[in-house]
Every structure is written in C-alpha cells, then in structure tokens.
Amino acid sequence: MSRIKSGDTAPELAVRQALHARGFRFRLRAIDLPGKPDVVLPKFKTVIFVHGCFWHQHLNCRRASKPKTRRDYWEPKLRRNTERDASLLKEIKALGWRPIVIWECQALNPHQLSNRLSSLGFLKRG
Ligand SMILES: [Zn+2]
C-alpha cells in the first residue's frame, strides 16, 4: 500500500482525532487553499495548520532549536519557511478564512491540545 509522504503525521492524526471526538466535521488537505491547510472546518470558515516545531520554528520551543552545525545552510532555509508561513496566513485571511496554527508539541500533549481547541471559542470543551 502506498502512503502519501507529506501527510498523516502523528501530530496531524492527534488533532483530527480530537476534533472528531468533539463531533466536528472537517475535510483534509485543502488543495484549493494557500498552503494546503491540514484540516478545514467549512462550517466555521476556519482552517488548521499543524506545524512541525522545527521546520516552522516554534518560538521558545525546545523542539525548534537550530542545529549547531551548518548554520549557513539552516538559517536561511528556516527563515524562508517562517516568511512563507507568515505570507500564507495573510493570504488565507484575505480569502475570508480564519487560520489556526497548532504546533506539533501542543498536538502531542493531550492536555495542551484540549486547551488549545477549547480556546478557539466555537469549540466546546470536550
Ligand atoms: Zn513546539
């Protein structure tokens, strides 16, 4: 069986399961939206990006510490990722959608994930 390389990571699955447990209907990987959001909640005009802490440089997160070697390679690369993320979020908003970022470290911690989802307002505490 083949597997799509970029999808179905543990943090993504955790977010989907948490949403599912709360009774939300959603679709996955919206290729028609900028950045192909991981989860789309059409009813709430909300999209969710599940971001890896390292690749998207989660601020003050220990998972995001930069490699100490090959700085000249990593720094511009990671900077480009964060710049790209910022412009994608702007594009999403300009299209009338509400973008939510859930970090890998939050997704993998059930308590934090529950708090994060509860803080979104429209999501009831589950
Ligand atoms: Zn993190």
Image: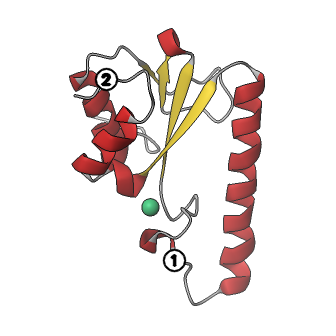
- Quadrant of the picture in which ligand 1 is shown: bottom left
In the image, taking residue 9 as reference, residue 33 lies left or right, namely right
Q: Which mark is residue 124?
A: 2
* Mark 2 vs mark 1: in front: 2
Side of 51 relative to 113 (left or right):
right
Of pointers 2 and 1, the one earlier in the residue sequence = 1
Q: What residue type is labelled 2?
A: Lys
Relative image position of residue 41 (x, y in whole percent): 47, 18
Q: Is residue 3 visible?
A: no
Q: Identify residue type, mark 1.
A: Ser
**Element type at marker 1?**
loop
Which residue corresponds to the image point at 61% horizontal and 26% vertical from the top-left? 98
Q: Determine the residue located farthest toward the bottom in the rendered image.
A: 69
Task: In the rendered view, tell whether residue 77 sits above or below residue 39.
Answer: below
> Which quarter shows the C terminus?
top left
Q: Quadrant of residue 18?
A: top left
The mark total stands at 2
On the image, the x and y values in percent for residue 61 come to 47, 69
Q: Which of 31 and 93 is in front in this view?
A: 93
Rendered view: 101 above or below 79: above
Above or below, 67 against 1 in this view is below
**Residue 23 got which mark?**
none
Q: Mark 1 points at which residue?
A: 65
Check the image and name the residue furthest to the top. 43
Q: Residue 119 at x, y = what percent?
A: 41, 36
